[in-house]
Image (cartoon, rainbow, N blue to C red):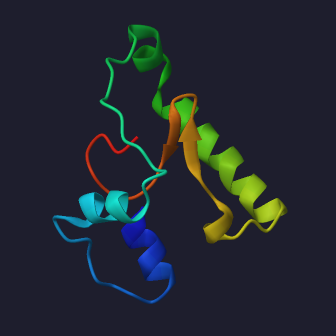
Amino acid sequence: MAELIAKENRDNTPCGTNWTDEFLLRNPEVKTIIGRTIEASRINSATKDVISEFFSAYTRIIERYNIKTHNQWDFNEHGIALGCGINAA
């Protein structure tokens, strides 16, 4: 996600190997958590059609309300995911 935001700002520099650690040091209010096992019901319900419809609906909302990239956040019931890295959410 960080690289996509950078590209929006015309910066094509890729994230370095220490980017996540440095980001967390600069932003102590952002925390990481260890990933959890996904329940079988979630895995089985994530079909190609369901995911495709989700992104179609998401795109329609973004376009309808003219939501800019800098106002879009990635979060779920476990918290907000920022940056690039493994288990960052």
Measuring from the top left, give residue 81's x and y in whole percent.
46, 47
Seen from the viewer's position, the closer of residues 39 and 35 is 35
Q: Is residue 32 left or right of residue 58?
A: left
Measuring from the top left, give residue 46's x and y in whole percent.
47, 25
Q: Is residue 6 left or right of residue 70?
A: left
Q: Quadrant of the N terminus?
A: bottom left
Question: From this viewpoint, which residue is outermost toward the bottom?
Answer: 10
> Image quarter for residue 17?
bottom left
Q: Is residue 12 above or below residue 35?
A: below
Residue at horizontal 45 percent and vertical 54 percent from the top: 82
Q: Is residue 7 left or right of residue 61?
A: left
Seen from the viewer's position, the closer of residues 16 and 27 is 27
Residue at horizontal 39 percent and vertical 58 percent from the top: 83
Residue at horizontal 46 percent and vertical 10 percent from the top: 41
Measuring from the top left, give residue 52's x and y in whole percent.
55, 41
> Image quarter for residue 23?
bottom left
